[in-house]
Image (cartoon, grey):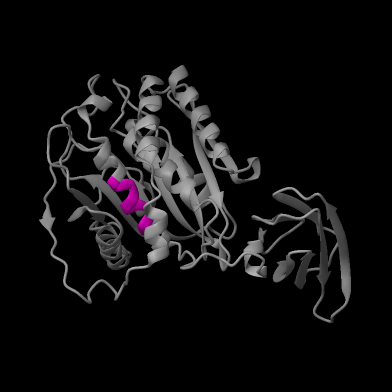
Amino acid sequence: MKTKIKIYVALLFIAGNCFAQTFVQHYADIANQVSQTNVTNNLKEYEALGVKYRKTAALENTYQWLITKYKSYGYTDLQISTDTYSYSGATCKNLIVTKQGTVYPNTYVIVCGHYDSITGTGTNDNGSGVVSILEMARLLKNVNTEYSIKFINFSGEEDGLKGSKHYVASVVNGTRPKMSIRLVFNLDEVGGVAGKVNDRITCERDTNNSPSTNNAASAAFTNELIKCVGLYSPLKTVLSYAYASDYMSFQSNNEVITGFFESNETTHKHTATDLLKNMDPIYNYNVAKAAVGGLLHFAKAETTVAKVGSSNNLRVNLLPNPVDDYLQLNLGELNTTRIAVSLIDLNGKLVLEKTFDHPQLTEILDVSQLKKGMYLVKLQSDEGEVSKKIVIQ
């Protein structure tokens, strides 16, 4: 929900600026897989779900619709979680989908947008952001990224950022140690205006004074986002400031933020005419391409396709790390009928051994009986061997 008048500054690109970012063909190949059919059909489905306000069946139905979408892309129950909260006599849900990073599994790039609406179906505000995030999640599902990613669909945004405020207070600050966030990338109202030339996307950075600690970092990441737009989409960019959407709950928590917002601003928001017919789905498609390119960059995705048969292709991740009792083994695209897991302490002693026959995408290993300290975890299958370090606390 954004109602404040915005001041725009058009940007001209100068070769060599923007942190010497260069074109990555693999990123472009992935961004080019954004589907116009998916974007348009998902907008139609989102619109058909109705007015998604608190206490409505439509809000719950949209939440369930989102879960079905993520599962169709291959995300599992262990990767999908819900942050439930209440206000004004209503129970609402934030939906979180987590993709583990290979190098920094406990540091997150958060991609977010709200799925609730007010008065109308909210097809632009914010079905357009929702369908963009769905394409981002679909295309990055099997791409290795150094940083973990959380795709978050917030409710309660139209009532004053209720959902994102609750998530920051209860999950981000409730994690011990506090959740480590590299960047929050917000998408709100990116559907364009029917009948207009929609060829610019507004990139938003933090200019707030309370706090102002991360303003410089936000500006730097937003400059990188601007560069990514030019590298991986046909859109031009406009620079503006962040306000009145879910990233502000993170901003007030002193996190680094950036965001996308349409440059031609709809007059249909918060009305019964916020419908697909008043949007530009081709623009929404181009925004999704830019967003995919930006996310690949921010999460530090692999720049080439992993070779089939290599140990890197196992894409195994171990979470949480440090761990208390149960270690989650995310086996990625491992295709084997048997995997042997060994834990070795710092003295080289084998302390735990377990074999999984016909392993699932995610398996759980009980380490609750082991002493605190650092261990080497070895996973062996007919596709190769992977070794990773963990800490039991």
Task: Classify residue 325 as left or right of residue 31.
Answer: right
Q: Is residue 101 above or below residue 90?
A: below
Front residue (pair 230, 375)? 230
**Point 41% across, 21% down: residue:** 49
Taking the view exactly as shown, the residue that stands out farthest to the bottom is 347
Taking the image as drawn, is residue 55 in sight? no
Query: Residue 297's x, y, as percent?
Result: 39, 63
Query: Residue 259's x, y, as percent?
Result: 30, 51
Question: Dominant secondary structure of the magenta stretch?
Answer: helix
Task: Classify residue 140 as left or right of residue 214.
Answer: right
Front residue (pair 47, 164)? 47
**Point 47% across, 50% down: residue:** 139
Task: Classify residue 8 as left or right of residue 202.
Answer: left
Check the picture and name the quadrant holding the C terminus: bottom right
Residue 299 falls inside the magenta stretch = no
Taking the view exactly as shown, the residue that stands out farthest to the front is 308
Q: Is residue 39 above or below residue 296?
A: above
**Point 55% across, 32% down: residue:** 68
Taking the image as drawn, is residue 22 in sight? yes
**Point 36% across, 26% down: residue:** 44
For the record, the magenta segment spans: 286-294
Residue 289 falls inside the magenta stretch = yes
Query: Residue 167's x, y, as percent?
Result: 48, 43
Query: Residue 161's x, y, as percent?
Result: 36, 38
Image quadrant assignment for residue 385: bottom right
Q: Is residue 309 above or below residue 190?
A: below
